[in-house]
Amino acid sequence: MTIKKILVLHTGGTISMHEDEDGDVETGVENPLTGAKMALPDVDLTVESIFNLPSEYIGPTHMLALQHRIVAAGNDFDGVVITHGTDTLEETSFFLDSTLSVDFPIVITGAMRSSNELGSDGLYNYQSALRVAADNNSRRRGVLIVMNDEIHAARFVTKTHTTNVATFGSPISGTMGLLTKRQIIYFYDLPKRRVLSVENVNKSIPVLKAYAGMDGQLLELLAASNIDGIVIEALGAGNLSREAANGVVYLLSRHIPVVIVSRSFNGVAEPVYDYLGGGVQLEKAGAIFATSINGQKARLKLLVGLDSQLNNEDLRDYLHQV
Ligand code: ASP
């Protein structure tokens, strides 16, 4: 039996929390995962508690620290497992996926029920993540999310439910793989992605959701502030009201990149309608369509693209790529 060396990086989240006597969930001083004995004969674990934070407190600076730790680990390990709060898990996963090109598997997991709750899913998901990270077939697949016996790709995964243990889903692409008692099964390979290195993550890029009757006032206010770009979760395939479209034109006239995604849960954003506010005219005005990602991921992708000094067509192609 080949023993796989796995680096485990705990960052906090419900998987590392416990319920108090009132039933409220909180972060403790000790991470209950640190001493967990995992029943896996073929893995040799190096465990580090890099943060102990609810994932709402995790931002791009923490993501970059994680990325640096993985780069520093270099080829000393056969795989990396990260435990993380589920609220921003998709963002950390996407950031690492967009900025790390490594052969070994990077697997992220979390839990919906804390460590001492009835039916806690933490240890089970942790063990599943270790199994996936130790599997040869998980190599060169980008960053993987393992929860509830399913494997998802960072690019397509999103949190779909506030409390259910079956919360992670990939609405556009479908589940990438499954864990059964004996097997790890992959259903498809991913399209190639462009990985960029990133040095600074301090750009200001708000995400705004479109709605019926949206006017351009907020967009004009934002144009006057110090933003580096903006992501708009537009209507349907990527459309806006006339007033909001005028706001977009104003932002673009100030050389502020505007990225369009859809506020719809499923499907891709692409220009279809040729009237003021329609996607075709937004694109002609200079807005960039990020095809298959949601607002929170498009924000990170724009941040990475801008930090890599991509401009005009290159930035457009990069964001447009699935
Ligand atoms: N609020 C928690 C967090 O993201 C939720 C979880 O981990 O499931 O840290």
Image (cartoon, rainbow, N blue to C red):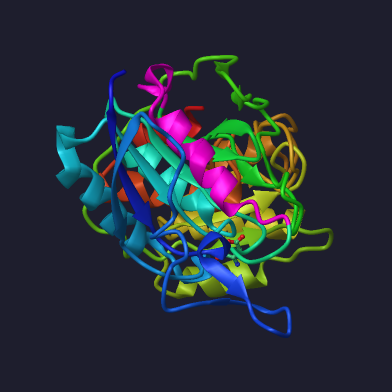
Q: In the rendered structure, does residue 138 fall within the stretch colored magenta?
A: yes
Residue at the bottom extreme of this rendering: 22
**Secondary structure mainly formed by the magenta segment:** helix
Q: Position of residue 197 (x, y in %)?
A: 24, 42
> Which of the pair 279/47 is nearer the observer?
47
The location of residue 123, given as percent across then percent down, is: 55, 50
> Which quadrant would residue 169 be assigned to in this image?
top right
Q: Position of residue 211 (x, y in %)?
A: 78, 59
Residue 192 in the image: above or below residue 162: above
Observer able to see residue 77 = yes
Q: Quadrant of residue 31?
A: bottom left
The answer to whether 43 appears left or right of 121 in the picture is left
Say which of 140 and 263 sits in front: 140
Image position of 169 (left or right of 91):
right
| Residue located farthest toward the right when viewing the structure as drawn | 212
Total count of labels? 0
Quadrant in the picture for the N terminus:
top left
Residues shaded magenta: 119-141
Q: State the residue in front, 292 or 208.
A: 292
Residue at 49%, 31% (x, y): give it.
320
Residue at the image position 73 percent from the left and 78 percent from the top: 23
Question: Residue 302 appears at what percent x and percent y?
Answer: 42, 48
Asked if 22 appears above or below 152 in the picture, the reply is below
- Is 68 placed left or right of 239 in the picture? left
Ligand 1 quadrant? Answer: bottom right
Q: Residue drawn 73% across and 66% down?
A: 215
Is residue 143 visible in the rendered image? The answer is no
Residue located at (58% from left, 34% from top): 156
| Residue 211 forms part of the magenta stretch | no
* Relative to 179, residue 300 above or below: below
